[in-house]
Every structure is written in C-alpha cells, then in structure tokens.
Amino acid sequence: MSENVIYREMTARDIGQVYAIELQSFTIPWTRDAFYHEVFYNDNALYLVAEADKRVVGYCGMWLILDEAHITNVAILPQERGKKLGEGLMRAAIQAAKEQGARHMTLEVRVSNETAQNLYRKLGFIEGGVRKRYYTDNYEDALVMWVTFND
C-alpha cells in the first residue's frame, strides 16, 4: 500500500473518479447522477474516498439513520486491490460512523465474496441473515453482516 493514502469525505470533484471505479467494479453500476444525488441531496449519506498519489483509488458510502450506519457500496480500483486499501477505507468508515453517533453498522455482501466477508469478520462483523436473490444481475443471495460498536 502506498504510504501516502488519505481517507477523506467525498466531494463533488471526486464523482468522476468514483464513477470510474464503480464501472470497473460492478456488473450493474450506479449512475454518475446517483453519486451526485448522494453527495448533494441525501442528508443521511456520507461517502468517503481513499486517495493515493492525488487520485481516488476507492470509495465507501453509507447512510446514517438514527444510531445505525448502513454501508451502501464500497469498491477499490481493480489494479489497487490486495493492498489493504479496503481495510483502511472500512476502518475510516467505521470511525466516521462512530463520530456521527452510530452504534451499529450493517452491510450486504455476496455469499460468494469470501474475500470481503473475511475482511468484515476481521473488523468485527458477524452474520445476521441472508437476503435471498438480492443481487439483480444474477440473483445471488446476500449475506447480511452487522457490527455493534462498544466504544
């Protein structure tokens, strides 16, 4: 991992790079307008980016509702995966959620995505259930995972 990675709140100027990561990461990507809406109009949304060498290499979005943070999406540029950027980004998201008053965090992950599941378990997430046929590209099930913050 590059030594000069910073994790910060996403801004309008990041949307193009975030959208490029989205296109490379998902079979049914969010639109550029969806990210724009999240940044400017969704008062419950908080998006973070991982920036290395002055370029966005990953992002994580969440919705903060009452004392719960729901991860909406998280992705790292394909060529930057395996460098612990996802872990750093998730740790930054957890910290940001706590700072906003969240006591719990939840997310859905593909049942086949063992790499992501292992990361989430490392960060304290536990399995909370399955959403059948959750993903519309191939109707794969989603594993729902939760963590409760103790501090």
Image (cartoon, helix red, strand yellow):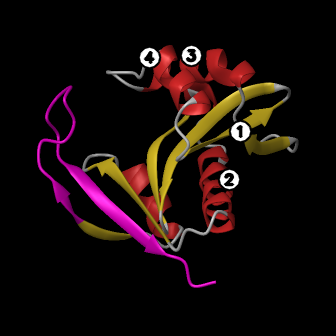
Q: Earlier in the sequence, mark 4 or mark 2?
A: 4
Q: Residues within 10 Å of mark 3 (few under 14, many from 20)?
A: some
Q: What element carries label 2?
A: helix
**Residue depicted at 41% across the width and 22% down the height:** 30
Q: Is residue 23 magenta?
A: no
- The answer to whether the residues at label 1 and label 2 have Cβ atoms under 8 Å apart is yes
Can the viewer see residue 9 in this picture?
Answer: yes
Q: What element carries label 3?
A: helix
Residue placed under numbered mark 1 in the picture: 50
**Residue depicted at 63% across the width and 20% down the height:** 15
Q: Is mark 4 on a helix, strand or loop?
A: loop
Q: Residues within 10 Å of mark 1 (few under 14, many from 20)?
A: many
- The answer to whether the residues at label 2 and label 3 have Cβ atoms under 8 Å apart is no
Q: Viewer-nearest of labels 1 and 4? A: 4
Q: Viewer-nearest of labels 4 and 3? A: 4
Residue at mark 2 to residue at mark 3: CA–CA distance: 20 Å
Residue at mark 4 to residue at mark 2: CA–CA distance: 25 Å
Q: Which of marks 1 and 3 is nearer the N terminus?
A: 3
The percent position of residue 46, horizontal first and vertical second, equals: 60, 45
Q: In which quarter of the image is the N terminus?
A: top right
Residue 128 is left or right of residue 40, and the answer is left
Residue placed under numbered mark 3 in the picture: 20
The percent position of residue 71, horizontal first and vertical second, equals: 46, 50
Residue at mark 1 to residue at mark 3: CA–CA distance: 14 Å
The span picked out in magenta is: 129-151
